[in-house]
Image: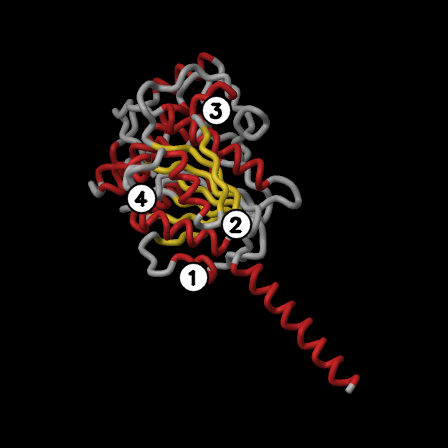
């Protein structure tokens, strides 16, 4: 390829895994002279950027988020390192969204915590904008299966760029795509091997939803497939909370999630920032509500196992009663 993404050249170590501070990611130690070289390499050939290929809103919003991750990665003490975001971001775009970056770090930490260990969740479902790079930049445990649910066109072009720069997921892990345009995403997840009787973690960040009904379909699907005790974490657009008048956002969230078997908790960006030792979050009301929700009900798969076991016990009881007669 004529030019590689400069971030891949500068940030990716010999190991495919990149861990951020607090032992979740391997710290990349860059001295001051090298950092000057990084900033001097910011000029990226426009041919390596997706933004000129399509002006669809899905592409624009995905590119904006990639730009936020790109700018965050270049900070002296970044919340996270995304070595691939520069492949998608226009070279002259300097905008940033600190709330989004804090939310991204919080979600990253949840993913690493929940998936680690022998008993960790090895099924990860990401509802994304198509340019999410977590499958490549996080240190996934062996045998983790990552399902990326996102717009087909965006995912295809992002995957092409990632292949061009040599991005790879960790060995023994698997990345599978589920198109947003699928007529039955729940069935397609099952067809691709998702097992409702195994632990999983679900993420919702950047996924395009047209209205509240669309998000309720997502909640229903997660509720059907996720085992009891599984987590659903992400960012919910604030505008969705304004579709039903008469409720405060937090009360509305509790009512909505509980209707699908989830106990939800809203996470304040300021609180996360303080825990990470960050300065005050960008002013103004956030565009999203950061949340983490625990599933309180059995999945369809668990209920099916329970039904079969109950039927077996009932049939054995009938047979014993017949023999006594």
Element assignment for label 1: helix
**Residue found farthest to the bottom:** 325
Question: Which colour assignment does the render follow?
Answer: secondary structure
The quarter holding residue 324 reads bottom right
For mark 4, what is the residue? Answer: 208
- Within 10 Å of disc 4 (Cα), the crowding (few <14, some 14-19, many 20+) is many
Q: Mark 1 = which residue?
A: 187
Residue 175 seen from this side? no
User: Badge 3: few (under 14), some or many (20 or more) residues near its Cα, within 10 Å?
Assistant: some
Q: Secondary structure at mark 2?
A: strand
Depth check: give the residue in front, 63 or 246. Answer: 246
* Residue at the spot of label 3: 272
User: Residue placed at 35% from the left, 45% from the top?
Assistant: 160
Tell me the CA gap for discs 2 and 1.
17 Å
Does label 3 or label 2 sit earlier along the sequence?
2
> Is the residue 324 above or below the residue 71 in the image?
below
Left or right: residue 3 versus residue 262 is left
Answer with left or right where residue 298 lies relative to residue 84.
right
Horizontal and vertical percent position of residue 211? 28, 46
The outermost residue toward the top is 32
Q: Nearer the viewer, mark 2 or mark 1?
A: 1
Q: Are marks 3 and 4 in contact (CB under 8 Å)?
A: no
Question: Which element carries disc 4, helix, strand or loop?
Answer: loop
């Amino acid at each position: 390829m004529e030019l590689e993404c400069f971030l891949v050249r500068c940030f990716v170590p010999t190991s495919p895994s990149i861990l951020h501070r607090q032992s979740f990611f391997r710290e990349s130690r860059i001295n001051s002279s090298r950092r000057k070289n990084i900033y001097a390499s910011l000029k990226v050939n426009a041919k390596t950027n997706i933004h000129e290929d399509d002006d669809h809103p899905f592409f624009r919003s995905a590119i904006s988020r990639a730009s936020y991750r790109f700018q965050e990665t270049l900070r002296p003490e970044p919340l996270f390192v995304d070595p691939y975001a520069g492949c998608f971001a226009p070279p002259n775009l300097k905008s940033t969204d600190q709330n989004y970056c804090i939310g991204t770090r919080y979600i990253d930490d949840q993913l690493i915590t929940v998936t680690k260990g022998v008993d960790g969740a090895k099924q990860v479902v990401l509802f994304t904008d198509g340019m999410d790079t977590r499958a490549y930049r996080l240190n996934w445990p062996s045998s983790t299966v990552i399902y990326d649910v996102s717009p087909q066109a965006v995912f295809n072009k992002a995957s092409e760029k990632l292949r061009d720069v040599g991005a790879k997921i960790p060995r023994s892990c698997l990345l599978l795509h589920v198109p947003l345009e699928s007529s039955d995403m729940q069935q397609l997840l099952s067809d691709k091997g998702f097992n409702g009787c195994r632990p999983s973690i679900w993420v919702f960040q950047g996924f395009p939803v047209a209205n509240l009904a669309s998000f309720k379909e997502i909640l229903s699907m997660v509720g059907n497939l996720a085992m009891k005790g599984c987590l659903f974490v992400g960012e919910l657009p604030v505008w969705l909370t304004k579709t039903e008048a008469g409720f405060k956002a937090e009360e509305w969230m509790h009512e909505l999630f509980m209707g699908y078997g989830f106990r939800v908790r809203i996470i304040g960006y300021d609180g996360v920032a303080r825990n990470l030792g960050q300065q005050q979050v960008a002013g103004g009301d956030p565009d999203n509500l950061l949340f983490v929700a625990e599933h309180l009900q059995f999945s369809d798969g668990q209920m099916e196992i329970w039904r079969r076991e109950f039927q077996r016990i009932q049939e054995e009881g009938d047979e014993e009663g017949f023999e006594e007669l």
